[in-house]
């Protein structure tokens, strides 16, 4: 659209105004790199084989969606929630419980188009309630309360056999199959995750510039002033939790379709912390950060073993590598990889203006 | 106490009734109807004692956590790792030298040293940045967990209980009366009682140190307002290092205790991190009496829960946390 208009002989002013408004709302549309990335993602099935498509890219997108929900809360709301993976896992469990799976005595056998919305709704409710609990205290307490919720859910899934089937979890979860397409086949599933990830990305981007998102950022920066202006800080925070919970739930549904099983291991404390690592390493000031972080994380997780062995080191020390990398990022860049990249670019090129967005804390 | 009753008569009444019921359940001989409804009294008494002694262990872990938080506003999510590290050190020392007491001393010193290094090398550089400190502790907990897995593997270890503490002891608590009229008393492992007494002693000593000594006064002042304290000329960095060392050392001792009570394996660090989080949320951040109260409540809830509603035990613990957050978000015994 922008190309078209620039070749017009005499652009009429109203179209020009809408174009400027569009660019102001979606600055990505001006960036050729963004178009290139989008194009590569769309034609990915032509380039990559099934392993890369699912194990690397679909997994990256799913983890990115879950980390995106954390990025939204942390970046725009200043609330670092460690329970986003728990919400995702809850959604996955609900898909397995309401839908069809190998554990017939637990699963209710609903069709996917009924089980999925149910799972999304319940997980959003779960996340909203958890958020309502977490906003009763402020700042650093949020991390503790959400971590406690996440850990409690993990131990609960381990203990409970009636609903969650204990530590074995629920296996061979059915995946959707309609219009003659098996939506869990590699290429179809890749496009499903890509579509959901794109929707979530643009939704977060949009909300961050909508009145609600701006008010949320105001609450983050100075909640007392916002309260004095007539906003209800806690209502905004809880609404942010609800929105983030829905995104995390989408990621969780995709995750359970991806692995076709869910067990307490998927909602362990370590996995909850991984989501934080992904978001922080990628950068929690912009929605693209979690996806970059997820790509780095998945690549490391998949290839660290081979690389470490190639260098004559112990291949099992993957988590050590992750931990040290995370520490390095926290020490040297409060803005993750994006921050490093931006600093590098600013040093090399002419100083560009920083786009407004979230910030740490 | 009197003020609490004055201000919250309803709550005070509930607490008094709950304590009275608990005391009656512990000391009375149960009527047959009650035994039929909820099982033998011996099971109940064992669960209560296990809960209280577990509370002692939780107190040891959580008091260090709450002390570090109270003074330095540092949510040390690597506290569970310090616990596990202390446990492994204690195991290594006790198998090497055969001395149980020595393992406590070495674990305390070793883990306190780790705490000193952490405070000097890491946290001092990012003072006042709560979130960044917390992130660093998360990173450290991952690194520590993997290093310990590397060195000690995934096996279960148990610290050997010394010979003079092995075996049960008879408590003056009636569990039942035999048909011959002979009273039956409760048998309980001596080591758990000794460890519980030790944690009570440590708790009282900490309370005395905090409330009756000069250094304790400095620490309490720092909890209230560390900027003003620094402005009065106290060498606050030294106090920070001391408190971090003490908190970490307590976690190390708790690790040896946990290794004797239960066992040590990867994953225990998260378990005890969760326990201290919940204890501190329930009791109140930065409050030592709060940590003691929270630890006993959570220990009891966990043990009674796992006896009477096994598959929902963790939910009880969690519900207590939710209830406290809903009614008194700052924690039961916190001032703010």
Image (cartoon, rainbow, N blue to C red):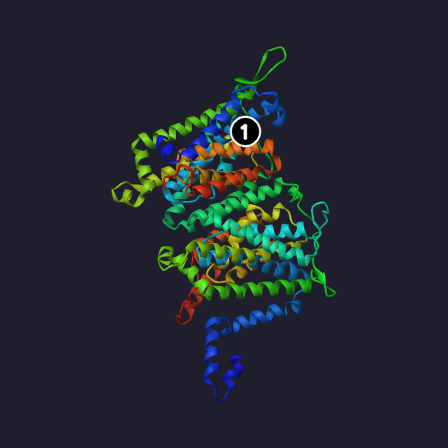
| A318, above or below B58, in the image | below
Write the residue at 34% across / 40% down.
B223
The quadrant where residue B118 appears: top left
Write the residue at 51% across / 49% down.
A130
Residue A326 visible from this viewpoint:
yes
| B314, above or below B166, in the image | below
Q: Split into 4 quadrants, where in the image is the C terminus of chain A?
A: bottom left
Q: Residue A45: image x %, image y %?
A: 66, 67
Q: Residue furthest right?
A: A180
Left or right: residue A323 compared with residue B238:
right
Q: Residue A39: image x %, image y %?
A: 59, 71
Protein chain holding label 1: B
Q: Residue furthest bottom?
A: A9
Nearer the observer, A204 or B320: B320
Circle 1 residue: B261
Tally of numbered tags: 1
Nearer the observer, A236 or B125: A236
């Amino acid at each position: 659209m922008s190309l078209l208009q620039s070749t017009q002989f005499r652009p009429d002013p109203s179209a020009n105004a809408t174009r400027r408004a569009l660019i102001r709302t979606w600055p990505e549309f001006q960036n050729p790199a963004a178009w290139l990335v989008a194009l590569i993602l769309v034609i990915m099935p032509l380039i990559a084989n099934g392993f890369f498509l699912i194990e690397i890219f679909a997994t990256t997108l799913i983890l990115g969606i879950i980390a995106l929900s954390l990025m939204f809360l942390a970046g725009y709301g200043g609330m670092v929630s460690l329970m986003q993976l728990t919400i995702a896992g809850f959604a996955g469990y609900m898909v397995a419980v309401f839908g069809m799976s190998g554990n017939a005595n637990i699963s209710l056998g609903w069709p996917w188009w009924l089980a999925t919305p149910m799972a999304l709704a319940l997980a959003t409710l779960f996340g909203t309630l958890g958020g309502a609990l977490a906003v009763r205290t402020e700042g650093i307490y949020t991390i503790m309360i959400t971590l406690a919720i996440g850990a409690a859910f993990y131990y609960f899934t381990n203990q409970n056999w009636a609903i969650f089937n204990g530590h074995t979890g629920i296996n061979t979860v059915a995946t959707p199959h309609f219009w003659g397409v098996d939506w869990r086949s590699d290429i179809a599933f890749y496009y499903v995750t890509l579509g959901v990830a794109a929707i979530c990305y643009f939704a977060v981007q949009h909300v961050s510039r909508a009145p609600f998102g701006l008010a949320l950022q105001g609450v983050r920066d100075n909640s007392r002033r916002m309260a004095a202006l007539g906003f209800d800080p806690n209502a905004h925070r809880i609404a942010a939790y609800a929105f983030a919970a829905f995104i995390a739930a989408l990621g969780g549904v995709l995750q359970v379709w991806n692995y076709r099983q869910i067990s307490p291991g998927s909602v362990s404390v370590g996995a909850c912390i991984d989501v934080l690592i992904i978001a922080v390493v990628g950068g929690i000031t912009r929605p693209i950060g979690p996806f970059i972080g997820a790509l780095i994380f998945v690549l490391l997780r998949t290839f660290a073993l081979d690389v470490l062995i190639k260098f004559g080191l112990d291949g099992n020390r993957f988590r050590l590598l992750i931990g040290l990398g995370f520490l390095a990022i926290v020490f040297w860049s409060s803005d993750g990889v994006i921050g490093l990249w931006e600093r590098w670019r600013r040093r090399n090129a002419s100083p560009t203006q920083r786009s407004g967005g979230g910030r740490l804390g | 106490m009197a003020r609490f009753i004055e201000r919250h008569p309803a709550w005070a009444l509930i607490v008094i009734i709950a304590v009275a019921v608990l005391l009656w359940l512990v000391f009375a001989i149960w009527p047959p109807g009650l035994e039929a409804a909820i099982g033998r009294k011996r099971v109940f008494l064992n669960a209560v004692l296990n809960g209280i002694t577990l509370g002692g262990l939780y107190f040891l872990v959580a008091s260090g956590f709450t002390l570090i938080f109270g003074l330095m506003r540092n949510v040390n999510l690597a506290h569970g790792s310090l616990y596990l590290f202390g446990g492994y050190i204690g195991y290594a020392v006790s198998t090497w030298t055969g001395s149980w007491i020595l393992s406590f001393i070495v674990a305390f010193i070793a883990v306190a040293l780790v705490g000193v290094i952490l405070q000097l090398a890491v946290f001092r550089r990012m003072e006042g940045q709560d979130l960044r400190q917390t992130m660093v502790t998360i990173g450290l907990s991952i690194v520590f967990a993997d290093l310990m897995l590397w060195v000690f593997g995934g096996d279960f270890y148990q610290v050997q209980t010394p010979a003079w503490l092995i075996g049960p002891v008879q408590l003056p608590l009636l569990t039942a009366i035999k048909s011959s009229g002979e009273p039956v008393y409760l048998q309980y492992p001596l080591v758990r009682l000794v460890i519980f007494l030790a944690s009570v002693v440590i708790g009282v000593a900490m309370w005395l140190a905090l409330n009756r000594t000069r250094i304790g006064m400095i620490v309490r002042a720092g909890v209230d307002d560390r900027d003003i304290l620094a402005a009065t000329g106290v060498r606050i960095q030294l106090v920070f290092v001391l408190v971090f060392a003490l908190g970490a050392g307590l976690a190390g001792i708790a690790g040896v205790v946990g290794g004797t009570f239960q066992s040590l394996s990867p994953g225990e660090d998260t378990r005890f991190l969760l326990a201290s989080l919940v204890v501190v949320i329930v009791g109140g951040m930065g409050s030592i009496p709060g940590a003691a109260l929270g630890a006993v409540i959570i220990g009891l809830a966990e043990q009674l829960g796992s006896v009477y509603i096994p598959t929902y035990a963790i939910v009880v613990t969690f519900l207590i946390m939710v209830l406290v957050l809903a009614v008194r978000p700052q924690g039961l015994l916190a001032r703010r």
